Image (cartoon, grey):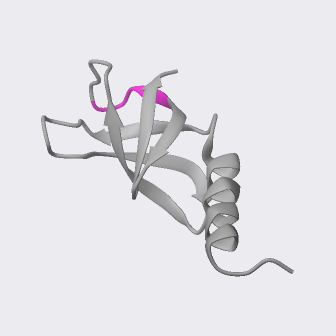
Amino acid sequence: STQGVSSAASDVYKRQEQLLGEIGQVLRVPDGEKRGKVRFPAPVLGSDEWLIISQDELVVGDRVSVKDLSGNALIVEKA
């Protein structure tokens, strides 16, 4: 069995696999350095609200799709 670094990396990969493509609704719009917030219809990995970053111009209520992870935030784009 592989322990240490590789298990941490596989944890991230598993998280990524579960989150990618998830569709949620914008609760708070990202603003400069401030993260936004998204809510999913059902909890993903134990939480239905996540911090988000986006290149898109978002407004509260927009549907967004998860493209990637960055630390504890999700990178999203308009769905």
Q: Residue furthest right?
A: 1
8 magenta-colored: no
In percent of the image, x 52 and y 38: which residue is there? 68
In the picture shown, does residue 62 fall above or below 51?
above
Looking at the picture, tell me which residue is in the foreground, 26 or 8: 8
Which corner quadrant of the image does residue 62 belong to? Answer: top left
Q: Quadrant of the N terminus?
A: bottom right
Q: Can you give x and y, in whole percent of width and height, for residue 69 in the image?
A: 48, 46
Left or right: residue 22 versus residue 58 is: right
Residue at the image point whose x is 14% and y is 42% from the top:
33
Image-based side of 27 in relation to 49, left or right: left
Q: In x, y percent, where is residue 16? A: 62, 49
Quadrant in the picture for residue 50: bottom left
Prevalent SS, magenta region? loop
Taking depth in this image into account, of 12 and 20 the one nearest to the observer is: 12
In the rendered structure, the answer to whether residue 73 lies left or right of residue 21 reads left
In the image, the segment drawn in magenta is 60-64
At x 32%, y 38%, the residue is: 53
Identity of the residue furthest to the left in this view: 32
Left or right of residue 23, residue 71 in this image: left
Pick whichever, 45 or 71, lies toward us: 71
Q: How many marks?
A: 0
> Which quadrant holds residue 13?
bottom right
Residue at position x 69%, y 51% from top? 18
Q: Position of residue 3 (x, y in %)?
A: 73, 81
